[in-house]
Image (spheres, helix red, strand yellow):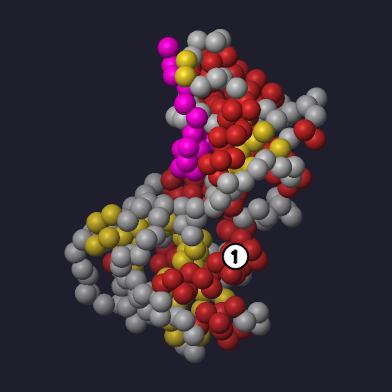
């Protein structure tokens, strides 16, 4: 008989939300029933995912255990929604509340996950939401134009690797790539999403053609990055009127990370591109490309994070 225990930490909650979304299609009838009955929702703002509080509030919850709980075939904690809500609020340090924006996100998530409007006939005014604090960080990486042809690499590679030089960069973090002075211009030439945690790896042969020197090092701690080039790229320092780039320039002692590369399938790159696009929260037009959404996300919504990241890498 499964034993129910309440979550005690944010990582446990985040894992449960991811697990619910991963396994829902294999338990389609149960997950549909649960989604229709849920009033209290947990929102992962990094991945744009939702989880029912009664599911995600128990440690390491899986669908078979949840089904057993419905049948009264569990021990430990009471199979009760009030208990899970209380545990979630204590773990996160926030309370569930009404949110029109989260309601819109939830309807979009439901259509993506289930492909149909299963909320038909549901009183959506009853929904309450708790958004988990973001674990995603933002970084500015410097590309020395005397060492690496970053612009050509951005056009030629879907994924590449950067050396981390001891920085605590993690999977899911987002990056602004700053090219140094060349042809009287310097500024942002690309964006990226970190696909892996740092690990020791060698350069990929495909990326060596973009180096302007032959000083290739051996294995170093590197991260795999998916590249993006929104329509607003490049954004040169001397063309910027917002003051954001000018403020960052004085702190642009960001490490001169040398690019290397390692192959990944286009499917993996595409999944990452979709995740980054969802994070953009741009809903103005279906014709807006994933890469444009990523750019708007960085420039419209994360200028403060960008300035902070320049400080962090200095």
- Which residue is depicted at the point 53% across and 64% down? 229
Does 19 lie within the magenta span? no
Residue 24 shown left or right of residue 152 in the figure: right
Judge by depth and name the residue closer to the eye, 175 or 210. 175
Which residues are drawn in magenta?
Answer: 1-18
Q: Position of residue 113 (x, y in %)?
A: 60, 33
- Is residue 197 visible in the rendered image? The answer is yes
The quadrant of the rendering that contains the N terminus is top left
**Residue 3: in magenta span:** yes
Tell whether 195 sits left or right of 114: left
Q: Secondary structure at mark 1?
A: loop
Q: Which residue is painted at 80% across and 35% down in the image? A: 125
Does 38 sit above or below residue 234? above
Instruction: Tell me which residue sits at (59%, 18%) in the image.
Output: 30
Q: Which residue is mark 1?
A: 302
- Left or right of residue 292, residue 285 in this image: right
């Amino acid at each position: 008989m499964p034993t129910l225990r309440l979550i005690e930490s944010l990582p446990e909650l985040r894992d449960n939300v991811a697990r619910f979304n991963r396994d829902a299609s294999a338990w389609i009838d149960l997950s549909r029933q649960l989604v229709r009955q849920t009033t209290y929702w947990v929102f992962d703002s990094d991945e744009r995912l939702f989880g029912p509080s009664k599911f995600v509030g128990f440690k390491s919850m899986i669908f078979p255990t949840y089904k057993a709980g419905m049948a009264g075939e569990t021990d430990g904690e009471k199979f009760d929604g009030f208990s899970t809500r209380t545990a979630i609020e204590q773990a996160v340090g926030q309370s569930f509340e009404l949110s029109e924006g989260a309601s819109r996100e939830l309807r979009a998530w439901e259509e993506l996950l289930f492909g149909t409007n299963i909320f038909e006939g549901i009183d959506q005014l009853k929904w309450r939401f708790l958004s988990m604090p973001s674990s995603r960080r933002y970084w500015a990486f410097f590309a020395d134009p005397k060492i690496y042809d970053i612009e050509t690499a951005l056009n030629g590679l879907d994924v590449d690797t950067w050396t981390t030089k001891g920085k605590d960069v993690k999977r899911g973090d987002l990056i602004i790539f700053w090219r140094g002075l060349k042809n009287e211009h310097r500024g942002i030439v690309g964006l990226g999403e970190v696909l892996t945690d740092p690990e020791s790896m060698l350069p990929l042969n495909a990326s060596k053609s973009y180096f302007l020197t032959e000083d290739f090092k051996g294995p170093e701690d590197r991260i795999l990055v998916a590249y993006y080039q929104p329509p607003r790229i490049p954004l040169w320092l001397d063309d910027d009127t917002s003051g954001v780039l000018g403020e960052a320039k004085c702190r642009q002692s960001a490490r001169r990370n040398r690019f290397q590369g390692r192959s990944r399938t286009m499917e993996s790159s595409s999944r990452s591109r979709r995740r980054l696009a969802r994070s953009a929260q741009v809903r103005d037009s279906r014709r807006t490309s994933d890469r444009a959404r990523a750019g708007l996300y960085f420039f419209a919504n994360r200028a403060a994070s960008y300035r902070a990241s320049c400080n962090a890498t200095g």
